[in-house]
Amino acid sequence: MAEVNLHELEAEILRRLKAIDVSSVALDESAIAVVLEEYLGSLGLDPRPIRWAKDGLDAMSLLARAELVTVQGQLDRFDRAGRVPVEREQKSWVDSRETAKAAGCGEQLDMARALVQGQSVLLSIPWRRYQGTMTGDRGARTNPQHSPAWTAVHDVLEYAARAAAECAWARLGSERQIHPSFESGLLPFVAAYEAGLWLFWITTSEVVALARPALRLLAKQLHSTEGPAVAWPEGEHQYYFLNGVNVPREIVETPARELDPRTLLHESNAEVRREIVRKVGIERVCEALDAKCLDRSGNYELLLLDLQDGRTRPFLKMKNPSVGVYHIEGVPPECRTVAEALAWRNQSDVPPSILT
Amino acid sequence: MDLEINSGIIISECLKHHGQGQLFFRADGLAFETRRSEARLEYLAAHDDIDPPQRAAILAAAITPGLTRNEVIAAWGLLEEDTRTAFGHVTEERRKAFAYFTGLEVGAPYALYFQDEILVGVKQTGELVPPHERELDMRIAEDSGLFYFYDGNDDQLRGSNVDQYHMDWDTMHLHLYTVEVVTPSSRYRIEAHLEANGALEKYETELNRLGHTIEAAPAEVRSQVALRLLPYPQPQRNKDRQI
């Protein structure tokens, strides 16, 4: 590689990633095509057409029938034993990569990616054993993270961040050589990310590409009170977030005054319950569920709530000091004081979702 | 090429609403057999709140997207014996289940797509969801009250009488459940089970028809034939998940 000032190059990559407006995507397909063609060439692969997925689900649908080309370890650098990518042991490399990913909203995109990956699939369930969300396992379920599609994925922001990390690593020692694929396999992905590419997969006949979704953020968290926080312009499938928590669409789009506080009784996720309480207001929740205070201590109250199914159950009401909002959590039926509820909570790892 | 099953493809297929507004008829000529017709009429009599167009479809022994799963069963007159080879894949997104099933014995190769309990799509396809390779062992273990099965890291299949992912507080903490290794069923165990269900003779006849003897039939053929003949024990319903 020609002589370059690696410090300046790393700063330039960070500046470019930070400058990207993630709230919208102006997709530059021709610029992306140039980068991908060069990348395929560096891997010794022939050029192939790019097929754009409309959204994350569409990408999964396209990939399910595709024959994927897996390129493993092409951009890694291994130790002498060939096991551990050596740069990952280096603090300078890791720090620079993390900083670059953060600059490109990597954390928020990782949340979106987890949603695109989806839940596991219960395989080969007999027709007679189907019970909707309560269907039990029949011996086999998938692990989305280890599926062929996700082991063969190419993450453009990851590659761009590695370009910055290579600069950080190589400039700290005269004997260090920048990665041989830097110019063809890492640096061009900064431009590809700027042009709107997020993920891609190489198949035997084409490249399946997924654009970066438009992200709506508040204080660096995925958040939108008026629509999806993660959406693709042409996509049909969108994701809704409040304060960094993935919530059902209805919770976002129903005005607070029309949102039934009893919704939280059917929600098993504690963070989603917190967002419902935050939106509806703790006073309306207590009123709707006919709350009776059994005990009070400091910022905690033990409330007896009417579950609207003939049962009442104790719930611990507490103020989350970090975000300043109230949180309601089920505790075992025998709890009658705040101290008992806290003692149970501090010694148990049982999620509140399974309390009855 | 094997299809990679992921939640995305199941959900996106469900959201395509295949066959919206169309009627799909049972094609094996058994739709109006007496016992099926009686079951259909009983169902309709017990559910007088069904909308007229859907009621008309059910009466005609046709299904259409929008019916509930029970309405599908009533419309096609699905008896337990029609469903023994029907398998599907199930996933979940934000507490909504998405699933598709193939292999219902109705004379045509349909895939049915469900969102929770509602039929949201119907498609004709040759694709068949295969049963788990240990399905017959599971079917036999169900008679011992084990209804939930998990592949262990040690390659052993384990069965439980309680869903390990949806357990209530008492059941979990007081260990009110059992977990047992499900051993592969021997030829003699399979035959004893078939005999107990009055199906041994049919089993032998079917093996002979396929060119095998009861003594020397390959394990895969035994399994396929036995699965068609063994009825499902009554399932236990999971309790609703609650906070």
Image: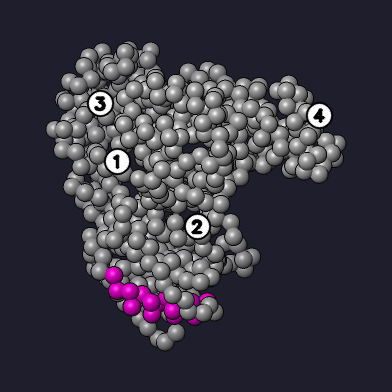
In the image: residue B214, left or right of residue A295: right
Give the residue pinned by disc 1: A248
**Alpha carbons under labels 1 and 4: distance apart:** 52 Å
Q: Chain of mark 4?
A: B
At x 39%, y 54%, the residue is A57
Work out whether residue A215 or residue B31 is closer to the camera in this orientation and state it: B31
**Alpha carbons under labels 2 and 3: distance apart:** 39 Å
Question: Can you give x and y, in whole percent of width and height, for residue A78 in the image?
Answer: 57, 67
At x 57%, y 42%, the residue is B107
Work out whether residue A5 or residue A262 is closer to the camera in this orientation and state it: A262
- Does A57 appear above or below A263? below
At x 61%, y 45%, the residue is B130
> Does residue B3 appear in this view?
yes
In the image: residue A123, left or right of residue A105: right
**Alpha carbons under labels 2 and 4: distance apart:** 40 Å
Work out whether residue B203 or residue A355 is closer to the camera in this orientation and state it: B203
Image quarter hosting the C terminus of chain A: top left
**Residue A105: assigned label:** none
Question: Can you give x and y, in whole percent of width and height, for residue A101 in the image?
Answer: 35, 62
